[in-house]
Amino acid sequence: MQIAELKRSQLDRVAQHRDNLRTSPHLRWLFFELTNRCNLRCWHCGSSCSATGASLTVAEVEAVLRSVLRGLDALDSSDPSVEDGRSVQGARPAVCLTGGEPMLHPDFFEIAGRVHAMGFGWGMTTNATLIDKEAALRLRQAGMSTVSVSLDGLEASHDALRQQPGAWRRAVRGLECLQEAGFRPQVTTVLHQGNFDELEPLYDLLCGMGITSWRPINVEPIGRACEAGDLLLTPDQFARLLSYIRAKRFDRNCSMEVTFGCSHYLGVDWERMVRDHYFLCGAGILTASVRSNGDICACLDVENRPELVQGNIRTDDFMNVWTNRFAAFRRDRTADCATCVDCPERFRCGGDATHTWDFEHNRPLLCYRDYHDSLATQQAPVTTV
């Protein structure tokens, strides 16, 4: 069987799995926006965070997790195959504490400790500017298992994007403190017009620091980035980014994993070339989130529109909402989309990433066909899948 034919078959299976999840969702990732406050003001921020805002309480986070545990117990009691361990459907979701900057929450370490004590694995996304040696050790004691740190280019471009002089140096110091405490942080870099030419020197820097995982991604047309349209990559730059990741992914001169993010369907030729899994957007079928005001939603990057809010933890039981709502995310968006209806990749793509779907005009803001021609000029390697 030819590689392309095999990949089409596997992509069709993934798409069918996605459709099955629309009727039988599986809560695999649970995000808490602990606060939408942030000590930086990044031009590309999808949530448009600022120095002031709302925060969840310790009791609210704990109540959500107790709801999850009750729901899992109900699943296990209805599954006769479960004996000593939980079924796959009854496995506890991974918890991600994020923001804003989550460490600005006054009770951050208490919340983190509670999550760990209740038996949930947890990780954090952070700008790392508040992490010193003491904080890194406290994160270890609180049971943090994964951490993603944003480093968006070299010093000048990072600080310009963050609108905060010194942010880069504090982030690098935070990374070093995490490493000294025994963590293996992943670095995420958002590529835009101002830092696109810094890929190679940043790669060399991170390799030299001993970073083991690097995720360069494209700036998305969401949140504050929509106010600065000159940030967005051109189709040619997007294709060059993927080509760069592909080359570094198979480069054995550095032990650092280089991978593209989960966003966006890339077509048969490029799927699995820049990440080790096929595209599948989990918003509302694998992923749920709680915003800092208590709103229950799918993915925190999805546009915060009233019709996409599924409930609020201050009035609704979280697992009841997860089980019985989320209809907006458990349907085929492409069925009534003029852009998608005649596309031959419609089933595999599924409307692409939910967070870049224009719900007002019912169309994708980013589409595989927008950069198809540019990708075709970048030869994808023939390799095993």
Image (cartoon, rainbow, N blue to C red):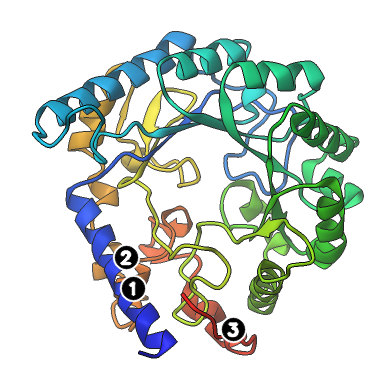
Q: Residue at x 58, y 26 (%)?
A: 144
Q: Which badge, 1 or 3, is on the more N-terminal residue?
A: 1
Instruction: Report crowding for label 3: few under 14, some 14 to 19, many 20 or more residues within 10 A (C-alpha).
Output: some
**The residue under label 2 is which amino acid type?**
Val
Residue 153 vertical placement versus 247 (above, below): above
Residue 10 shows which numbered tag?
1
Q: Is 121 displayed left or right of 24 in the figure? A: right
Disc 1 vs disc 3: Cβ atoms closer than 8 Å? Answer: no
The CA span between labels 3 and 2 is 21 Å
* Residue occupying the point 59% across, 22% down: 53
Location of residue 226 in the rendering, given as x and y in whole percent from the top left corner:
62, 54
Q: Report, in whole angstroms, how far the alpha carbon at label 1 lies from the one at label 3.
A: 18 Å
Please give left or right for residue 38 compared with residue 330 in the image.
Answer: right
Q: Quadrant of the N terminus?
A: bottom left
Q: Are marks 1 and 2 in contact (CB under 8 Å)?
A: yes
- Percent position of residue 219, x then y: 65, 58
Q: Amino acid at mark 1?
A: Gln
Residue type beneath disc 3: Ala
> Is disc 1 surrounded by few (<14), some (14 to 19) or many (20+) residues within 10 Å?
some
Which disc number belongs to residue 14? 2
Indicate which disc residue 90 carries.
none
Rendering coords of residue 62 (x, y %): 40, 14
Percent from the top left, x then y, of residue 333? Answer: 29, 62
Q: Residues within 10 Å of mark 2 (few under 14, many from 20)?
A: some
Element at badge 2? helix
For label 3, the residue is 380
Q: Which residue occupies 80% across, 47% down?
A: 210
Residue at figure coordinates x 24%, y 65% from the top left: 16
In the image, taking residue 208 as reference, residue 22 lies left or right, namely left
